[in-house]
Image (tube, rainbow, N blue to C red):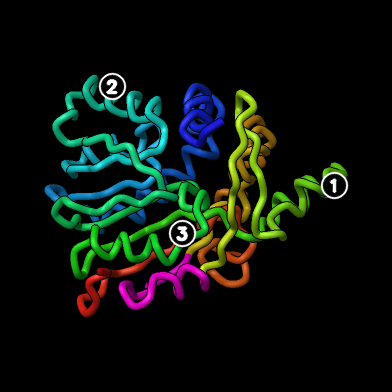
Amino acid sequence: MSNNAAFDTLAAVYDRDFAESPVSRWLRERVWGWLEPHFPEGSTAFEIGCAGGIDALWMAQRGVKVIAADISPFMLDQTKAKAEAANLGHLVTPLLFDLNHLPEWDSEPVDGVYSNFGPVNCTRDWTGLGRFLARAVKPGGYVGLGVISPFCMWETLWHGLHLDFRTAFRRFKRETIATLPGGGTLPIYYPSPRQFVRAFQPYFQFERVRGLGVFLPPSDAFGVVDKRPRIMKPLIAAETHLADYWPFRTWTDHYWIEFTRTSSHSGD
């Protein structure tokens, strides 16, 4: 099964199984709070891995013009349909995009790039991605990436306690094969923040890294917390106050890493 087809099967259940979870909604809104200062009304954005278009529509509702890129034609169709239904079609441009076959950037550079919940884990050519983004982003522009972390405390403890050691320690190998709905498979890579910083030099200046899902569980354990609001409240409090700090941010399901485009290198 091709990557396109694998993601098409995921698209059919993405909103139900992931995006609509209370934990997922809270984490997404946390990311929106980080993105908002970088994308004022009238700015332009490029989204890597738009999935069903939730983030792209949020951007468009705020007056941001978004190129919403994804490898799945079905995901792009969903995004386009949602944008048109919300009368935002003029602000959202779907783009078929493969991280492992990066195109030439032939449009005007955008004000910033973002990618939420791990699309960039589908490639291991982070140096090539850095060069591509150097052409796509204006000098002084913003890049924010939500990356699946090489170590997740929740995942290791939860699956270890359930004697599922294969899942508990899968990230330790820095590469695994994920099984998607419908039987498709996909290689997933787990780069560290330091690897991204090195790969994006000299085109981008590293700004910060934050934890995203330190105390809240990864997606395969959302139900543990979703069904127990009394548990969720203190976990959210801990996430809010501690997840950005060391060592907690090194235990996270995803980390959020931010860069600023430098002006001294072209990316050519």
Q: How would you rate the neighbour count of disc 1 (Cα within 10 Å): few for under 14, some for 14-19, many for 20 or more?
A: few
Question: Considering the numbered disc 1 on the image, is that residue within a helix, a strand or a loop?
Answer: helix
Q: Note whether residue 229 is visible.
A: no
Estimate the x, y position of residue 187 in percent, counting from the top left: 60, 46
| Identity of the residue drawn at 24% across and 19% down | 85
Tell me the residue that label 2 is attached to. Answer: 81
Please say if 206 is above or below 81: below
Amino acid at pointer 3: Trp
Q: How would you rate the neighbour count of disc 3 (Cα within 10 Å): few for under 14, some for 14-19, many for 20 or more?
A: many
Q: Note whether residue 150 is visible.
A: yes
Gap between marks 3 and 1, in whole Å?
27 Å
Residue 198 sits inside the magenta stretch: yes
| Identity of the residue drawn at 47% across and 37% down | 25
Residue 235 sits inside the magenta stretch: no
Tell me the residue that label 1 is attached to. Answer: 161
Gap between marks 2 and 1, in whole Å?
43 Å
Q: How many marks?
A: 3
| Identity of the residue drawn at 27% across and 65% down | 134
Amino acid at pointer 2: Ala
Part of the protein shown in magenta: 194-209
